[in-house]
Structure formats: C-alpha cells, structure tokens
Image (cartoon, rainbow, N blue to C red):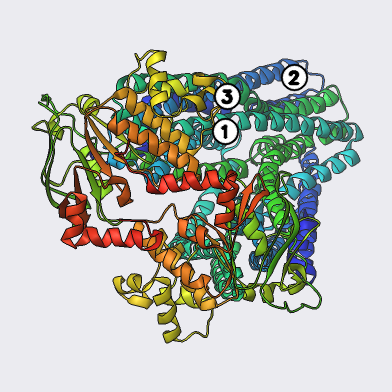
Amino acid sequence: MTEPIPRNPIAALLRPVRGRLVLAASLQVVSSALVLSPLITSGVIARQLLADPADRGIWSTLLIGSLLLGLGLALRGAADLIAHLADNTLTLILRRRVAARLRTAPLGWFTDTTAGQVKQGMQDDVGALHHLVAHSYTEIAGAVATPIAAYAYLFLVDWRLALVLAVPVPVFVLIYRRMMADSGKQMGEYGRVLAGINSAVVEFVDGIPVVKTFGRTGRAHAAYRAAVERFSTFFLGWARPLIAPETLSNQLVAPVTLLALTLVFGTGFVAAGWMDGIDVVPFALVGLGLAGPIGALTSNLMALRMGQAAAGRLSALLRIDPIPEPAAPAIPSGTRIELDHVHFAYEPDREVLHDLTATFEPGSVTAIVGASGSGKSTLARLMLRYADPTAGQIRLGGVPLDRIASAELFRTVGSVFQDVRLLRAGIADNIALARPDATRTDIERAAVAANIHERILRLPRGYDSVHGEDANLSGGEAQRVSIARAFLLDPDVLILDEATSAADAESEHAVQTALSALVTERSRTVIVIAHRLDTIRDADRILVLDHGRIVEQGRHNDLLDLDGAYRRLWHAQHHTEGLPR
Amino acid sequence: MIRRLARYLGPDDAVLIHRYFRWAVCASLLQGLTLAFTIPILRALLTGDTKIAASWLAGFCIAAAVSWWIEYSATLKGFDAAGELLTTLRHRIGDHVATLPLGWFTPTNTSTLGLTLSKGVMDILALPVRQLTALIKSITIPLVLIAALIVVDHRIGLIALAAVPVVAGLYWWAGRLGRRADAAVNRATADASDRMVEFAQAQPVLRTFGRAGSATDHFDQALREQARAERRQLWLVLPPVILNGMVVRLTLLALLSTVIAFAAGVTDPLALATLLATLPIINRLVTPLGEVASHATVIRTATAQMDAVDAILDAEPLPEPATPRHPAGATVEFDNVSFAYRTGTQVLNDITFTVPQGTTTAIVGPSGSGKSTLIRLAARFFDPQDSEIRIGKTPLTSIGAEKLQRMVAPVFQDNYLFSGTLADNVRIARPDATDTDLDQVAQRAGLTSVITALPDGWHSQVGEGGARLSGGERQRVAIARAFLKDAPILLLDEATGSLDAENQQAFAAAIDTLRREKTVIVIAHQLSTITTADEILFLEDGRIVERGTHQELLTMNQRYAAHWRALNAARTWRLLEQ
C-alpha cells in the first residue's frame, strides 16, 4: 500500500506549520518597510531644515522615525521567534512521523544502508528544512519587501526618477536568467566531472596505503593527477565565460551604479526644472540598497532548492511500506514450524531461496549449514518475519506467520543473533527488554545463566550501569547480555546464530558456554545457523543449504556417508585444523 | 590569509594572488572615492547650482567608469589565482601525502584528507573569487568614506570613526554568542539523530523481544523532551540573530541623528547643504559594516579548511637515508622497541626478539595487547621511539622506503582493491608479471575458483574498493599479491573473523605454502599456525610476557597455556555438549 508521492513534497511536509510561516513572513514584510524609516525621516528632516533651519518640528519627526524603527525591529524579532518556534514544532512532528514509520517497517528493511538513510534524514535533511523554516522564508520575504517598499516611497517623491532607478532590475533579471540557462546546460556535465574527481579522491586516499606497500605510488597518483587536471580544465572552461556577465549583472545593481543613475538623471531633472534639488536626497538615501536584498534572495533560493531535495528524501523515508499486521489474528496451536514451498527474493528476478519445504518439530534441535551466501541467514530471518516469503508459506503451530499478531509471534519465537544491539539504557533494562515486569532476581538469574552476572557486578553501577555511558562491554560480553535476554524471555522456539570467533578466545568460549546452557536448559524447538560444523554435529537434524536450496538433510554421520555437499564442507573445515572426525 | 594562499601557490605563482589583492584593494578604494563625490554633487544641487553639480558629476562618472573596469580586472585576476590554486593545491597535497608513512593513514586522517581534497579545496578557491573581494570592499569603502567625511566635517568624520570599533565589537560579541548557540544546537541535533539511528537499528531487538508498545512510548517521550530542550535553547539562539539585525539599524539611526543635530539651526545655506549632503554617505558607510560579519563567517569556514590543508602539509614523512644500505639477509630483529602513539598511550614496551631468516614467529595475545602495532612497526608504518628494528643487520631507517617495500609483503585485514580488473589488482605487486605468473599465484592463493566464477575471469571489474568481491575473496587477492611480490619477509594478520569455512581453509592453505619459503611474523589465530611456529611470543599489555615453542609454553603452564586452552575449547565447542 504505497502512498502516492506528493507532487510538492516540501509543501506537504510544511503543512502543519504553514499558518505560522505565513504569519512570520507577513510580520517580516511589515518590518522591512518600517526599518527604512530612519532613512526616510532623514530625507524628510533635510527638507524641513532647508525650508527653515530653526524648525523645531524636526525633533518630532526624528522621534516618530525612531519609534517606527523600534516597532520594525520588534516585529522582526517576533517574526524570528515565530519562525523558530514553527521549526521546533516541525522538527518534532517529522521525528515522530519517521519514528512511527520505523516501527511498522518490515524488519528486513533495517540494514546499514537504511541506517545511513535515517541518519541523513534526521541530521542533514531535517537540518536543511530547519534552515528553510527558521531563516529562509522570513529572509526571502524581507528581501522582496525591502526594495518594493523603497521604490513605492520613491515613486511618491518623484515618479520619473523612480522609474529610471527601476531600469536595472529587469536588465539584471534578464542577464541573470540567460547566465543560469547557459550554465544549466553544462550542469549535467559538471555533475559528472565532480563525481569523477570525488571518486578519484576516494580511490587515491583509500588506496594509497596499499599502493605504497607495493611501491606503486606512481600509478594511483597518476590517475588522481589526471582526474585533477580534467576537473580543472572543465571547471575553468565552464566558469571563465561566466565572469563577464556575472560582473556586469553585479555591477548593474551595485550602489555606485544606482548612485550614478540618481545623480546624473537627478541633476538633469533639477536642471530641467522637473524636480527640486532636495528631492534627489531621498533617492540617494533609500534608492541604492538593491544589491543586499538580491544577494539575500539568491542565497536563500539556493537554500530553498536544497530544502526541496531534502524534503523529497524525507518523504521517501516516510513512505516505507509497513509490514501488514493481521486484521483478525489467529492463535497458533503448538510450536511446530513448517516451511511450505517457500521462495524468497530481495529484488525481483534474483531469488535467493527456492522452494524450501521442511518441518521443525517441537523440542528438536535443527542445524542449518551451508557455504556463505547459501541463504541460511535469510531463512532464519524469514522465520522471524523480517520479511514475508515471495511465494509459499511459513507456519507456526499451523498458522501462517502473516496471520499471527507480531507480539504473539515474538513471545513464542526468540532469537540470538550475532549483530547484538544493546540500547542506551541500564543493563538490567536491556536484559528485561522482553519482560519489563521482571524482578531484579529474575534478571540476575538470567544473567547468571548467561555467564555475564559477574561481569555486570564489576561495572561502576552494576546492573544500573548504562550501556554506552558507564557500561562499556566488549562484543562477546554484549553477546552474553543478549543471551540473558533470551533466558528471561524463555521462548518455546529459539532461532540462533552460532557465534563465530570473537577477538578473544576466552570471551568466545564464554559466549559458547552461555549458548549451550540456553539450548540445553529445557526442551525447546531450536534452529541454529551454524558456521562451524563441529558445533552442531550432535543436532537432531542438519539441513544443508546450497545456493538457496535444501540439498541434503539428516544426522551428522548419515550425511557424511552420503558423500555429498555436507562431506565437502566438513572436509574443507578439517583440512587445516586436523581435528579428529 | 593572502600569505597562506600565496604559500599554497608556491613561489612561482604566488605573484598571482598578490596581483589580485592589489587590484581588489584599488577597486575598493576607487569605489569609495566615487561614492564620496556624492557630497559635493548633492551640496550643489541643494544650493540650486546645477552647473557646479554637473562639473562634479563629470568627475564622478569618470571615477565610476574606472572603478568598474578595475573591479572587472580584479575579478579576472582573482579567477586566475583561483584557477591556479584549484590544480596546484590538489597536486601539492597529493604529492605530499604520497611521501607520508603508512602509519599516517588512520581512518580520521584519511577521511579529513578526502574531504579536504574534494570540498575543502573548493571552499578555499572561493576566497579570491568572491569572499575576499567582498570583505575587502566592506572594510575599505567605509574607511574611505570616513576619510572623506573628516575632510568635509571633521566632527562627523571622527564620530563615524568612533562608531566603527563599537559596531565591530557588537558584531564580534553577537558572533561569539551565535557560535556558542550553534555549537549547543548542533550537539543537540547530533544527539537526537544518533537516537533516531539507534532506534532504527534496535528495531529487530525492540520488536522481537515483544515490547514494541512500551519502548515506543519511551522513545516518543524522549523525542518530546528533546523538542522541549531545543525550545529552551531558543533563548540562546535568538538573541544573537536579533542583535545582528539591530546593530546596523541603530548605528545608522544614531549617526543620522548626529548629523541632523549638527545641522539643526545652521543658517548658512552652504554649510547646511554640506551637512545634509553627508546623510546618504552615512548610509553607504554603515551598511557595508553590517556585511563584514556575514563575509567573515564564510571566510572562517575557508580558514578552517586552510587549517586542515596545513595540518596535512605539515605532517612529516619518515626520514629517508641519504645513502640507502642493503640489508644482509632477511632476519628481522626488534631491539628493545617501545612505541607510543602521539596521543601518549604507551602501546609497546621493551620488545626484543629475533626472527631468523626463513622461520616463523607467531604473535599471540588478547585483543588490545599491541599485536597490530608490533607488526606494523616491522613494515615501518611508524618509527619506534629511541630503539631500533633491523632487517638483515640493517636498521629500517637506513634501508630506504623503496628497498624496504621490496623486502616486506604485508597481508593485513584492510585489503583495499582499486577499481579496475582483477588482473590489474594482482599485478600491482609486479607490473611485468606474465599471464602465466598470474595463473600460478592465483592457484597458490586459492584465487582460481574466484576467477572462474566471475563472468570475465581475470578481466572482471572489481568495483570501487573491490566492492564486488566478498571479504574472503579480497583477502585471497591480497595473498595472491604477496605471492607475486615474492618478498623475503611476510607480515601477516590472520584475523579470520569475517571468513566462512571455505575461505578460511583456502587462506590457511595459502599461508602454509608461503611460510615454508619466507621469514614470517604472523598474528596467529589458527591452531595450526600457532602449533607449527618456530617461536611464539605471548603479548600482554604491550609486553612479551612469555616466549618459546608451543610445547615449551604449554609446559610452563602460565598465561599462554591458559590462552591455548580457551582457544582450543572455543574451537572444539559443541552446542549440545554438557
């Protein structure tokens, strides 16, 4: 049930704070006009003084100007405050929406890549939107309003000179658009060249230790140098022709140019008797500030574009397909697991599991073995409903997994995998994740069974030490905490990944002993993904997977006698270690 | 800053940046002067004398035209300097890092290097093209105008001059407040996004352990608290933003009011006109001051990039001998070697051992005992402090990088492959190797099965960083390289955590062959490697605590024996035992 992509992702994302943004922008517009008041009142006062140098009225004019400026600055502060508050609200809304999506996404969705996407989304993209909401909209409003207010005032003073001063604006727009169009044509090529230099840099930087050890620095270096030259040639060739129009357009709206127009035409008009000398002063005061707003406008339009890209990515993150919960969940009867012609593909037409059929009887221990890439981990994850099979069914107690409520499924089926995740919470909370109501005695009993109790006692705050703060556990220790979790959950079905060698032999063996204890504690259905065949030679049954198919199954000795895939695997592992059969 | 840019360009091209700087300053001075012409023109207009106005106007127009032309030239000069920088800087950094010792290439350093070469260079480049010109203008023009004001009316000029440090001080203060607020906000955001990532990564655990509901509430509460905390930070964030907006406006108001105060009651029409004519100049003087702050921010970013460049260029290559000496044989000796990283933690202490030519020494010990550092010292990733490592009676420091790399073949865990074909990647060890040579080493390294499985065999592309091969396959490529290189000394890190059974077997077999012909120092994890080594060094906390053959150490029944028993237990463990 993919939701339609909103046509304008940024508008859709910003909808909750749209009203406040409009308010902030409106305040900013009014403020932009008001903060011109010192310049306008100076012009007015100049006129008063020329008429009567002793005019006391100038002081009240000055006071009014100051008050208006104060009001303008206050409104501007209010606009900033409102925009920042809107940003604060929006950030919370976005984070909660992303979190809500993450909760319902299929577990198979969570990989290192997607963790990167979440990070990019929460950090960079929300950051880009922050800039947009908190700053850009008000700044754009101000940048547009300032020159309009200034020109409106000048138009009242003298419409002819105001028209003359307005001339550079359309010319600027014309040149700027032509320039953008020209450089836009080359933008695609620029993207390619940029990607080229970036990957040359990555390759050079990452590869240099290797090429150095082989004394072939020259080779990688030459490729890098060539990429640098290519980039420079393109970049300079692209940018040089833009200098003239860019300088021209910048000069067009620069104060000197506008001043030149004001003075030349002003003098002319005064000489022609169309206006008084004093009428030129407001123009020289108010009419020269075009470059600033235009600069603000271009840089904020850039922020707008980046915000759009960010909004697009965030919308994509918010459109992850949730894994459907059954509308009317069924209760499994018993704990038998059946694979019924299960097929699975991560991407269409790249099937990794083909037509698997097998039954895991309650109370039995089944090992799944096979070379890396044979699909054993994928199979284990399907049984935990990380994803649904593309064809066929997996049943627990006679009920297909997609008709069991996930809470029910995970009460029955526990797992211990190698990629252990401890939460940034107390160690006791980490163990009691499955049973928040567990007493401290229960938790400690689980930790003792998992061989980690004593290590936890040695932590600064014992069971209350927080992972990542004062509890720095090694990989093997974290693994034992996760085994303690499983002890406490005490599931009828246990799916586990045999731990491969940790950094330390001692630590590795402690994990192994804990796993053995978990498996032999009481009778449960155990499915173990095995990497070393010695580990599981006593299993009730061994399934041998090869390229996503079950090619052999049986007990260790029977499989060896078959003289097939299992025997080859066994032989490969015992060739070097020379252990007895 | 100009000096630093000049240094990057080198003595031959430094003139480019100086030339640019001179033109940019000229352009700004002239623009200030042009603006100053406003005073006499307006004064003439206010006194109704259009003739005098017209003659000043002529001067104004000439000055304006010249300033346009100079500014355009300055832009071109800046562009020339930037163009030269673009190439030179990247080459300079590239050439320099190629000489740095392998120990320099830590993850932190390489990621900074990558960023500097791609983004950093572009940021620095923007200095002469845009930011510097803008900054020079916003400083020079107000100063010229103040000078002009002093000439016209020294009271106003001096007051304006006095305002400059006040404005600068206020901006500096606002900037400092702003940076402090930004830092706090960035920390908060980074923390929030870390929590989000953690939440995503922990989903399997949170859900499979069946407590999705309560954990969810907990997380939602954390998000709301985060938002509240961020809202409280607004009192930190907003004041500098608002202050920035106010400084220019209030300064402008103050200076304009000053002029008006001076003008009030002046009855001499010419004097009055002069004072009033300065009003627009006051505006032109204050506005750029407000822009200094924003230019300065951009320039600070570029300066940070320049600091990164300097840090890279200042890293020193290991000293090379003037006349490299040829080692007599391939015996490796560590003579009382101690080593500490720059951070100060002592990693190795008094390490002394000899690996006679053609023998194998296995290094065994718990993680963090200094094994990796020790083996890297032998490849001269770094030089040890006050001690010597010798190959064939010759200190590493006197052998010279080129000869040393021919003597030593390291096979570590980070087996980088560059994009290109598989053959290219193996041949890097000996560019003149024939196809037959390649096939031979592939056979011995267990790479043949990998090659036959690939669509284009030897000519298959391996992808950036070797991404199209698995970790085990990359490791076999590394061994093939070592075979092809045929160096007399092999340094080996046997960590095989990431390898599956089949790859482990291929790896072990290949190593076994290599060992028979070479001097080998190996960080050993395989039981067979350990038992057959000529000598075992048991390392703990950076010291050799036990040494001897496997049997001798077992007989001692100390640390090594305990380690061995654990290792053995781990290797022979059965899930269903008890």
Q: What is the secondary structure assignment of the residue under circle 2?
A: helix
Q: Quadrant of residue B139?
A: top right
Q: Quadrant of residue B326?
A: bottom right
Q: In the rendered view, does B360 fall on the left or right side of B151?
A: left
Residue B186, numbered circle: 1
- Is there CB contact under 8 Å for labels 2 and 3? no
**Residue A465: x and y, percent?**
52, 22
User: Mark 2 — on which chain does it sit?
Assistant: A
Mark 1 Cα-neighbour bin, 10 Å: few <14, some 14–19, many ≥20? some
Q: In the rendered view, does A217 fall on the left or right side of B435?
A: right
Which quarter of the rendered picture does the C terminus of chain B lie within?
top left
Residue A391, numbered circle: none
Residue lying at the far front of the rendered structure = B555
**Label 2 is placed on what type of residue?**
Ile
Q: Choose mark 2 or mark 3, whichever is in front.
A: 3
**Label 3 is placed on what type of residue?**
Arg
User: Mark 3 — on which chain does it sit?
Assistant: A
User: Mark 1 — on which chain does it sit?
Assistant: B
**Residue A27: x and y, percent?**
51, 23
Residue highlighted by disc 2: A58
Mark 3 Cα-neighbour bin, 10 Å: few <14, some 14–19, many ≥20? many
Residue highlighted by disc 3: A76
**Label 1 is placed on what type of residue?**
Asn
